[in-house]
Amino acid sequence: MNTRLRKSKSSDIQFMREMLYEAVFWRPNPKKPSFAEALTDPGVRNALADWGEREGDTAVIALVDSMPAGAAWYRFFTDENCIRGHINETIPTIVIAVHENYRRQGIGEKMIAWLIDHASKHNIEKLSLMVAKDNHAIRLYRKCGFLDYADKGDSFLMLRKTDP
Protein backbone atom coordinates (compact mmCIF):
# COMPACT_ATOMS: atom_id res chain seq x y z
CA MET A 1 0.00 0.00 0.00
CA ASN A 2 1.55 3.25 -1.19
CA THR A 3 0.22 6.32 0.67
CA ARG A 4 1.06 9.87 -0.28
CA LEU A 5 -0.33 13.34 0.39
CA ARG A 6 -0.79 16.20 -2.02
CA LYS A 7 -2.25 19.66 -1.86
CA SER A 8 -5.79 19.71 -3.19
CA LYS A 9 -6.70 20.84 -6.68
CA SER A 10 -9.94 22.43 -7.85
CA SER A 11 -10.92 19.07 -9.36
CA ASP A 12 -10.98 17.55 -5.84
CA ILE A 13 -14.08 19.45 -4.71
CA GLN A 14 -16.52 16.55 -5.27
CA PHE A 15 -14.30 14.16 -3.31
CA MET A 16 -14.01 16.78 -0.56
CA ARG A 17 -17.83 16.98 -0.42
CA GLU A 18 -17.98 13.20 -0.10
CA MET A 19 -15.45 13.31 2.72
CA LEU A 20 -17.41 16.12 4.40
CA TYR A 21 -20.44 13.83 4.36
CA GLU A 22 -18.30 11.08 5.94
CA ALA A 23 -17.03 13.50 8.60
CA VAL A 24 -20.48 14.73 9.58
CA PHE A 25 -22.38 11.43 9.29
CA TRP A 26 -19.72 9.01 10.53
CA ARG A 27 -22.04 7.00 12.78
CA PRO A 28 -23.85 4.01 11.25
CA ASN A 29 -27.41 5.28 11.01
CA PRO A 30 -30.10 4.12 8.59
CA LYS A 31 -31.90 7.46 9.04
CA LYS A 32 -29.02 9.72 8.00
CA PRO A 33 -29.90 12.18 5.23
CA SER A 34 -28.98 11.55 1.64
CA PHE A 35 -25.82 13.17 0.35
CA ALA A 36 -27.86 15.81 -1.53
CA GLU A 37 -30.04 16.57 1.51
CA ALA A 38 -27.01 16.88 3.78
CA LEU A 39 -25.45 19.53 1.57
CA THR A 40 -28.51 21.76 1.97
CA ASP A 41 -27.89 22.13 5.71
CA PRO A 42 -26.07 25.47 6.29
CA GLY A 43 -23.77 23.95 8.90
CA VAL A 44 -22.62 21.39 6.34
CA ARG A 45 -22.80 23.56 3.23
CA ASN A 46 -20.67 26.34 4.76
CA ALA A 47 -17.73 23.97 5.23
CA LEU A 48 -17.00 24.06 1.48
CA ALA A 49 -19.12 26.94 0.11
CA ASP A 50 -17.14 28.83 -2.55
CA TRP A 51 -14.08 26.69 -1.79
CA GLY A 52 -10.84 28.26 -2.93
CA GLU A 53 -12.24 31.78 -3.14
CA ARG A 54 -11.62 32.58 0.51
CA GLU A 55 -8.15 33.58 1.62
CA GLY A 56 -6.51 30.78 3.57
CA ASP A 57 -8.54 27.88 2.16
CA THR A 58 -6.12 24.96 2.44
CA ALA A 59 -6.69 21.26 1.84
CA VAL A 60 -4.71 18.07 1.58
CA ILE A 61 -5.76 14.87 -0.17
CA ALA A 62 -4.49 11.45 0.89
CA LEU A 63 -3.96 8.96 -1.90
CA VAL A 64 -3.52 5.22 -1.44
CA ASP A 65 -2.15 3.54 -4.56
CA SER A 66 -3.18 6.71 -6.46
CA MET A 67 -6.82 6.49 -5.27
CA PRO A 68 -8.28 9.25 -3.04
CA ALA A 69 -8.57 7.87 0.49
CA GLY A 70 -9.07 10.95 2.66
CA ALA A 71 -9.25 14.71 2.76
CA ALA A 72 -8.54 17.32 5.40
CA TRP A 73 -8.76 21.06 5.25
CA TYR A 74 -8.82 24.20 7.26
CA ARG A 75 -10.69 27.36 6.59
CA PHE A 76 -11.34 30.69 8.26
CA PHE A 77 -14.95 31.42 9.15
CA THR A 78 -16.86 34.42 10.41
CA ASP A 79 -19.47 34.20 13.14
CA GLU A 80 -22.12 34.51 10.41
CA ASN A 81 -20.95 31.67 8.15
CA CYS A 82 -19.32 29.28 10.62
CA ILE A 83 -19.47 25.56 11.16
CA ARG A 84 -19.13 23.48 14.33
CA GLY A 85 -15.59 23.87 15.58
CA HIS A 86 -15.42 27.63 15.01
CA ILE A 87 -13.85 29.67 17.81
CA ASN A 88 -13.22 33.04 16.18
CA GLU A 89 -12.26 34.66 12.90
CA THR A 90 -8.50 34.37 13.55
CA ILE A 91 -8.44 30.59 14.06
CA PRO A 92 -9.21 28.34 11.09
CA THR A 93 -11.35 25.27 11.63
CA ILE A 94 -10.30 21.81 10.49
CA VAL A 95 -12.51 19.23 8.79
CA ILE A 96 -11.04 15.77 8.27
CA ALA A 97 -12.31 12.43 7.00
CA VAL A 98 -10.78 9.18 5.85
CA HIS A 99 -12.76 6.76 3.69
CA GLU A 100 -13.95 3.85 5.80
CA ASN A 101 -11.80 1.36 3.85
CA TYR A 102 -8.63 3.21 4.89
CA ARG A 103 -9.28 4.13 8.52
CA ARG A 104 -6.87 3.25 11.34
CA GLN A 105 -3.88 3.14 9.01
CA GLY A 106 -2.24 6.44 10.01
CA ILE A 107 -3.68 8.49 7.15
CA GLY A 108 -5.58 10.91 9.39
CA GLU A 109 -2.48 11.54 11.49
CA LYS A 110 -0.43 12.29 8.36
CA MET A 111 -3.05 14.73 7.06
CA ILE A 112 -3.28 16.53 10.41
CA ALA A 113 0.52 16.84 10.56
CA TRP A 114 0.48 18.26 7.03
CA LEU A 115 -2.16 20.86 7.97
CA ILE A 116 -0.32 21.85 11.16
CA ASP A 117 2.95 22.25 9.26
CA HIS A 118 1.29 24.26 6.49
CA ALA A 119 -0.49 26.51 8.99
CA SER A 120 2.73 27.13 10.91
CA LYS A 121 4.59 28.07 7.71
CA HIS A 122 1.82 30.57 6.92
CA ASN A 123 1.91 32.22 10.36
CA ILE A 124 -1.33 30.68 11.55
CA GLU A 125 -0.89 30.21 15.28
CA LYS A 126 -3.82 27.94 16.17
CA LEU A 127 -6.23 25.44 14.62
CA SER A 128 -9.59 24.27 15.96
CA LEU A 129 -11.90 21.33 15.37
CA MET A 130 -15.01 19.75 16.82
CA VAL A 131 -15.31 16.07 17.68
CA ALA A 132 -18.13 14.03 19.16
CA LYS A 133 -17.25 12.52 22.51
CA ASP A 134 -18.03 9.01 21.22
CA ASN A 135 -15.90 9.36 18.08
CA HIS A 136 -12.76 7.20 18.23
CA ALA A 137 -10.89 9.95 16.35
CA ILE A 138 -10.74 11.94 19.59
CA ARG A 139 -7.70 9.84 20.57
CA LEU A 140 -6.00 10.77 17.30
CA TYR A 141 -6.64 14.48 17.85
CA ARG A 142 -5.23 14.34 21.36
CA LYS A 143 -2.22 12.38 20.09
CA CYS A 144 -1.68 15.17 17.53
CA GLY A 145 -1.63 17.78 20.29
CA PHE A 146 -5.20 19.06 20.29
CA LEU A 147 -6.48 20.02 23.72
CA ASP A 148 -10.05 20.30 24.94
CA TYR A 149 -11.05 23.96 24.65
CA ALA A 150 -14.76 23.73 25.49
CA ASP A 151 -17.23 21.01 26.42
CA LYS A 152 -20.24 21.33 24.11
CA GLY A 153 -22.36 18.57 25.64
CA ASP A 154 -22.04 15.74 23.12
CA SER A 155 -18.81 17.11 21.63
CA PHE A 156 -15.52 18.75 22.46
CA LEU A 157 -14.29 21.89 20.80
CA MET A 158 -10.54 21.33 20.53
CA LEU A 159 -7.63 23.69 19.93
CA ARG A 160 -4.00 23.24 18.99
CA LYS A 161 -1.16 25.71 18.71
CA THR A 162 0.76 25.15 15.49
CA ASP A 163 4.12 25.62 17.21
CA PRO A 164 4.14 23.29 20.23
Image (cartoon, grey):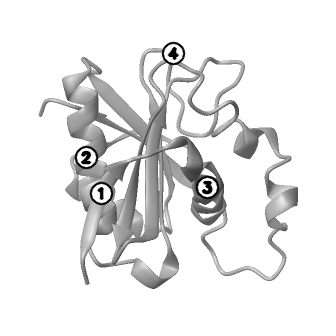
Q: Earlier in the sequence, mark 3 or mark 1?
A: 1
What residue is at 30 percent from the left and 57 percent from the top? 5
Q: Earlier in the sequence, mark 2 or mark 3?
A: 3
Q: Earlier in the sequence, mark 2 or mark 1?
A: 1
Residue type beneath disc 2: Trp
Which label lies toward us, 2 or 1? Answer: 1
Q: Earlier in the sequence, mark 3 or mark 4?
A: 3
Q: Which residue is disc 1 drawn over? A: 5
Q: Earlier in the sequence, mark 1 or mark 4?
A: 1
Seen in the picture, residue 95 relative to 79 is either above or below; the reply is: below
Q: Which residue is disc 3 drawn over? A: 20
Measured Cα–Cα span from mark 4 to mark 2: 22 Å
Q: Is residue 146 visible?
A: no
Query: Looking at the image, which residue sits at the far left?
Result: 164
Which label lies toward us, 3 or 1? Answer: 1
Q: Earlier in the sequence, mark 4 or mark 2?
A: 4
Which label lies toward us, 4 or 2? Answer: 2
Seen in the picture, residue 130 relative to 137 is either above or below; the reply is: above
SS category of the residue bearing label 4: loop
**Res 58 quadrant in image:** top left
SS category of the residue bearing label 3: helix
Q: Position of residue 20 (x, y in %)?
A: 61, 55
Residue type beneath disc 1: Leu
How busy is the neighbourhood of tag 4: few (under 14 within 10 Å), some, or many (20 plus)?
A: few
**Res 162 quadrant in image:** top left
What residue is at 66 percent from the left and 61 percent from the top? 21
Q: Position of residue 59 (x, y in %)?
A: 43, 42
Q: Which residue is disc 2 drawn over? A: 114
Q: Which residue is disc 4 drawn over? A: 89
